[in-house]
Image: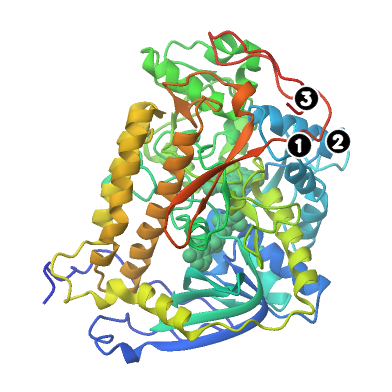
Amino acid sequence: MPNFPPQPKRPGRRAPEPMPSADAPPARDAVTPADLADQGTIQRVVHEADVLIIGGGTAGCLAAVELREKYPNLSVMIAEKAHVDRSGCLAAGMNAINAYLNPGETAESFVRYVRFDACGLVREDLVKSQAELFEYAVKKVEGWGLPVLTDEDGNYAARGRWNIKINGESLKPILAKAARDAGAKIHNWVVVTDLLVSDGRCAGAVGFSLRTNTFYVFKAKATIIATGGAAGLYKPNNAYDAQHKTWYSPFNNGAGYAMGIRAGAEMTSFEMRYVALRTKDAIAPTGTLALGVGAPMVNARGERFMAKRYPHLGGDGAPTPFRAFGPIEEAKAGRGPCYLDTTHITEEQARQLKAAYLDMYPSQVLYWAANDIDPMKQPVEVQTTEPYIVGGHCQAGYWVDADRRTTLPGLYAAGDVAGGAPYKFVSGCWAEGIIAARAAGAEVRDLPMPEVDHRQTAFHYQRTFDPLFNYGKVKYGVRPYDMEVRMQKIMEEYAGGASNHYEMNEERLLLARKYMGQLPDQFGQLVVSDMHELMRAHEVMDRVDVGRVLVEHLIARKETRWPAFQSRTDYPERDDLHWLKFVNSRMDTASGRIEVVLRPYEQLVEGDRYHPGETPGKKAPATPKPGG
Ligand SMILES: Cc1cc2nc3c(=O)[nH]c(=O)nc-3n(C[C@H](O)[C@H](O)[C@H](O)COP(=O)(O)OP(=O)(O)OC[C@H]3O[C@@H](n4cnc5c(N)ncnc54)[C@H](O)[C@@H]3O)c2cc1C
């Protein structure tokens, strides 16, 4: 008998509707531990393709189409945890493409801007190569049916310097259809848990079905990982039943980072966390207000504090970390809460504003309606979120070369899971999917299908289902939810959570290292009773692995480069002399130790590297020579 009461039926939780998919096996009743008492009832299914794409989201769908178009003889399969029609960050739609070269801009001017926005440190080669493909990618998706708005000159309608407006409610189904039509074989409802490695090369991945009792072995000559970033590492702003109402997709749990970490791939810049400034409670993106209707940020006294306190950084146009840091400092000084002031907008603008949110974040409009809020009459309250790890907004992720090859041969990374290139957004993720696809397709043409040692798949089979097999066997079982709460508490209190104003110091971080390091010892105690909970168990194990690496990165960077994203109270200054470099890490697969390595920054695009102003109120350090 299990040592806890059987899981009650969750009120209101319906079995998800089966969605149409050419390949999906018919949904069956949830698998119960009783079904699996005899482990032999789990089917093992092997699929092979030239290229495996893990994650059928923004980057994954574009990679699939590009592969099939450029190399029609290659077979391509996608393993997707949800259903490609509505999965990942794009599930609810988008109302703008945030990275595009509007008239007058070039790939170089984009690099200069991103370098400024990321406080001087980016992989310029990666940022430039994504910018060079913005137009190609957007035109492609427009051709598949995405409505891109245009101005009276026939140009795409600009929203600020780098954004263009779209009617993107159906963006995700459009991408999914394109991938399907291109002939990619799609496996929906498959949670990928680990990479396969054969002779030092990635040979595919393993996972399990959320709908049937199936263990999958996906063998491939090359693999593109496109699983997005990581939500849920820190205690969320919303608690209890709303705990998964996060800004970033809660289903993107960092699985792609975690499997790479466990396989020994090199990661970069985890310490550049992303703290989003979002509308309070609804957590909707604020670009729609700031850029869409020109709403400035004000504090509780109505002061335009960004212009007042950060003029040297561009005021309301200060680098993204400062736009989160500013309101946090206002709140600390007793001048919160902060708002985006929409009280100047016209009725037509208010209508357009709601239409824009309905294309991407309908809950914002519902929230206003439910709480009797009229943005024409009252400013919109904003709040910073819990920190995320997101390679597309910041630059945490796999260390890749120009072709998006990771340091694990045979494995490519694209989108939010790939590091070094912030400011990717939708179009940059598309560009990276395309770049990775071109390189992977060229590489595999003459390669044989890898052999995978059956001991490796047996190991992963056991690791995958252990929490389910533990049901009724482990005396002091731990449920995934309980481990998640413990992990989030550690990260919140010792590694710079919202309640500590995102601040941290060496002493706290060492405690975070200690307590996070204890959690893997409890993985063997995880107990679950159905496939949904099994997914939750893997999500929390992945989050712990990602969190441990994050803590090592936070310990390693002994400066404050990105206030709020990475605020070290013991090293409050930016220190270009010593820290204009990348903090990278690699887990030693034999010992499990996380080793930190530093990689140099290289300036490739001429021009001022960034504005001279430094941490507010502090003396600016000497600007190093270009490339220094
Ligand atoms: C709320 C929100 C609003 C945004 N607004 C804009 C905007 O207006 N404009 C803009 O340009 N950008 C916007 N962005 C950013 C942009 O959407 C993302 O950067 C981009 O979509 C990420 O693409 P991706 O392919 O890396 O990840 P995703 O599109 O999220 O795809 C990841 C996929 O991997 C799957 N997956 C995860 N784990 C596993 C696993 N273990 N096994 C199998 N599959 C797995 C997921 O289900 C998902 O389908 C927004 C992001 C968010 C979260």
Q: Nearer the viewer, mark 3 or mark 2?
A: 3
Q: Secondary structure at mark 1?
A: strand
Q: Is residue 575 above or below residue 226?
A: above
Residue 626's label in the rendered image is 3
**Pointer 1: what residue?**
158
Say which residue appears at 37% left-offset and 67% top-offset: 535
How was this image coloured? rainbow
Q: Could you tell which of marks 1 and 3 lies nearer the N-terminus?
A: 1
Label 2 Cα neighbours within 10 Å, binned few <14 / some 14-19 / many ≥20: few
Q: Position of residue 140 (x, y in %)?
A: 79, 59
Pointer 2 residue: 103
Instruction: Please give the name of the residue rendered at 42% of the width and 21% of the height, measured from the top-left corner.
Output: 570
- Label 3, label 2: how many angstroms apart (C-alpha)? 28 Å
Label 1 and label 2: CA atoms lie apart by 9 Å
Residue 181 placement (x, y as % from top left): 71, 76
**Are the two marked residues, 3 and 2, in contact with CB atoms closer than 8 angstroms?**
no
Residue 82 can be seen in this image: no
Q: CA distance from mark 1 to mark 3?
A: 32 Å
Callout 3: CB less than 8 Å from ligand 1: no
Q: Quadrant of the N terminus?
A: bottom left
Nearer to us in this view, 52 or 319: 52
Q: Residues within 10 Å of mark 3 (few under 14, many from 20)?
A: few
Please name the residue shown 53% across and 21% down the image: 341
In the figure, 341 relative to 454: above or below? above
**Crowd around label 1: few <14 · some 14–19 · many ≥20 (10 Å):** many
Q: Residue at x 67, y 52 (%)?
A: 400
Q: Residue furthest front?
A: 591
In the rendered image of this protein, does residue 576 appear above or below residue 244?
above
